[in-house]
Image (cartoon, rainbow, N blue to C red):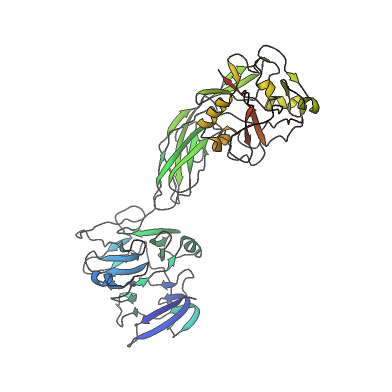
């Protein structure tokens, strides 16, 4: 239990000093119990709360003020001030509304109207801040019976009291509670983000805390915690502010876009991304990405597009007010090309950077000059090869349309060339150029892999196929002649004599390079001359 010390001078003729041990303390005139989420719950529909009033000199004379200490300064730039240990300074919380003051900031209500100010100064003669009833009626609750010395209770209340004074025996008649001191302030409850969010679901409007995570005072209103800043009172939430990035890396089936959430609208952004459509003014009801939350820059990969089609896209950001959109952009997807091999198989092709690649694995059974490539099925025969050969996965031609053929390096590097005229088996240098263009080995694999689990086994980490390469998990044939499990890996030969190959895996976004035995059977992709 926390120990709260009060020096109470209320309706008593003499000073009464008490110590209260309680989870909740309520001050009210209707006998209701304090709200469970409030340490001190003051409830009144006809009176306000007075905070200790100190001059600038008296405030600065406080020795080692504690973080979050709150006072009302009565001289110079008068108003609420709280002490911020991180800044080693007193921070103005509210500046009174008075157009003749040296500092003037006007407040607005939740609709943005000048009338019905949430926090408004009532004039020089009445130096206090009042809460307009339409928006901040006193809904904080409870006071309890007469306080007893060293009382222990789950909920402690003070009831049937006209006014209660702490540090004064003559509390102002306009207040339910007046705290008076020229040497001390009032400590508000200090909670971290996690502690604040752990409060009960029925937090009353008007509850005040010092948020030690955000280093600011906050007020609860309509299910949202708002920061209190100088001259603004409750900062009314509005839609976020967001811009849309230009499209890039446009392939026949995908494009990269994104945005920048430059302001959250005074309430957290819970979702952001890009939405798109073949029609103008796309919304989140159309296709969309979800790229995290909060403010700042983000990147989005738009997938599942049709070739040679114009799309319209906007970045979006959502908070509890609604969804805001950035400026609309448009882009047109690229078109696939085609290539035909010496067997008559037709392949789609795609431009990636400065290169043009085949989109499917090679299926040919002949070299460019028409010589047949040996189709070797036996394990022992495959293991003993020193010349070019191919096979279908598991020696089953049914796998040909989707996965193409598996070739040993002797075929991939053969001078007769697996590719038709104008094309060639990709070299190590060309694979390196591709991987570098896509951002390096750590991320290139995700951009090359086909999306989803139609062919790849779970989880197919980071697969976006953003450049249309459409890598499939073709598996391999080992140098023993055995086949590995289909679905987890994709391997591609280079034509280099060092027998370099590149591989992608189902549980990472990497595209790595390695050299191994030339007897292995891997897939082959072609590059245009």
Is residue 5 depicted above or below 209 in this figure? below
Q: Is residue 330 above or below residue 347?
A: below
State the count of labels: 0
Measuring from the top left, give residue 324's x and y in whole percent: 42, 44
**Can residue 335 be seen in the rendering of this structure?**
no
Picture layout, residue 213 above or below residue 64? above
Residue 488, located in which quarter of the rendered image? top right
Single out the residue that lies furthest toward the left.
Answer: 100
Judge from the rendering whether residue 377 lies leftward or rightward of residue 128; answer left or right: right
| Quadrant of the drawing holding the C terminus | top right
The answer to which quarter of the image holds residue 26 is bottom left
- Judge left or right: residue 316 versus residue 169: right
Res 89 → quadrant: bottom left
Out of 35 and 529, give the one closest to the viewer.
529
Give the farthest residue toward the bottom.
14
Residue shown at 70% from the left, 31% from the top: 476
Q: Residue furthest front?
A: 498
Q: Is residue 446 visible?
A: yes
Give percent across and percent down for residue 256. 49, 34
In the rendering, at what x and y percent does residue 527 appear? 58, 21
| Residue in view at x 72 percent, y 15 percent | 372
- The correct choice, above or below, for 11 with respect to 311 in the image is below
Which is nearer the eye, 77 or 208?
Answer: 77
Residue 227 placement, left or right of 426: left
Residue 365 position in % (x across, y down): 71, 18
């Amino acid at each position: 239990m926390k120990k709260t010390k009060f020096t109470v001078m209320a309706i008593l003729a003499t000073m009464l000093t008490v110590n209260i041990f309680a989870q909740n303390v309520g001050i009210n005139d209707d006998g209701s119990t304090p709200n469970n989420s409030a340490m001190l719950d003051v409830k009144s529909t006809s009176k306000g709360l007075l905070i200790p009033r100190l001059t600038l000199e008296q405030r600065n004379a406080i020795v080692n003020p504690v973080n979050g200490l709150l006072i009302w300064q009565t001289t110079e730039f008068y108003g609420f001030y709280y002490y911020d240990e991180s800044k080693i300074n007193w921070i103005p919380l509210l500046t009174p509304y008075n157009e003749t003051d040296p500092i003037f900031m006007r407040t607005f209500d939740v609709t943005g109207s000048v009338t019905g100010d949430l926090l408004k100064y009532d004039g020089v003669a009445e130096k206090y801040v009042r809460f307009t009833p339409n928006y901040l009626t006193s809904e904080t609750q409870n006071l309890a019976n007469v306080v007893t010395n060293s009382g222990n209770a789950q909920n402690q209340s003070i009831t049937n009291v006209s006014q209660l004074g702490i540090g004064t025996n003559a509390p102002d008649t306009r207040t339910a509670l007046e705290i008076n001191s020229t040497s001390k302030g009032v400590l508000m409850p200090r909670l971290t983000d996690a502690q604040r969010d752990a409060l009960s679901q029925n937090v009353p409007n008007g509850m005040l805390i010092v948020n030690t995570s955000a280093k600011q005072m906050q007020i609860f209103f309509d299910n949202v915690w708002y920061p209190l800043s100088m001259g603004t009172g409750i900062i009314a939430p509005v839609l976020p502010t967001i811009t849309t990035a230009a499209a890039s890396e446009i392939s026949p089936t995908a494009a990269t876009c994104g945005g920048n959430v430059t302001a959250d609208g005074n309430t957290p952004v819970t979702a952001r991304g890009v939405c798109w459509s073949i029609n103008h003014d796309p919304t989140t009801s159309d296709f969309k990405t979800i790229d995290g939350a909060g403010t700042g820059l983000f990147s989005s990969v738009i997938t599942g597009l049709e070739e040679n089609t114009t799309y319209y896209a906007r970045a979006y950001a959502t908070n509890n007010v609604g969804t805001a959109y950035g400026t609309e952009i448009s882009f047109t997807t690229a078109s696939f090309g085609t290539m035909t091999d010496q067997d008559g198989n037709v392949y789609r092709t795609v431009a990636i950077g400065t290169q043009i690649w085949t989109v499917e694995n090679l299926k040919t059974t002949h070299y460019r000059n028409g010589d047949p490539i040996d189709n070797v099925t036996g394990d022992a025969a495959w293991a003993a090869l020193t010349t070019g050969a191919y096979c279908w996965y598991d020696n089953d031609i049914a796998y040909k349309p989707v996965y193409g053929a598996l070739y040993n390096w002797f075929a991939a590097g053969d001078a007769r060339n697996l590719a038709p005229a104008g094309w060639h088996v990709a070299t190590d240098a060309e694979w390196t150029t591709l991987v570098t263009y896509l951002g390096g080995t750590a991320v290139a694999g995700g951009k090359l892999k086909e999306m989803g689990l139609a062919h790849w086994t779970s989880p197919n980490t980071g697969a976006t196929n953003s450049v249309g390469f459409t890598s499939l998990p073709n598996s391999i044939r080992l140098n023993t002649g055995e086949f590995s499990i289909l679905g987890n890996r994709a391997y591609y030969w280079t034509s280099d004599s060092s027998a370099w190959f590149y591989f992608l895996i189902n549980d990472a976004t990497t595209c790595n390079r390695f050299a191994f035995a030339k007897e292995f059977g891997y897939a082959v992709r072609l590059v245009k001359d």
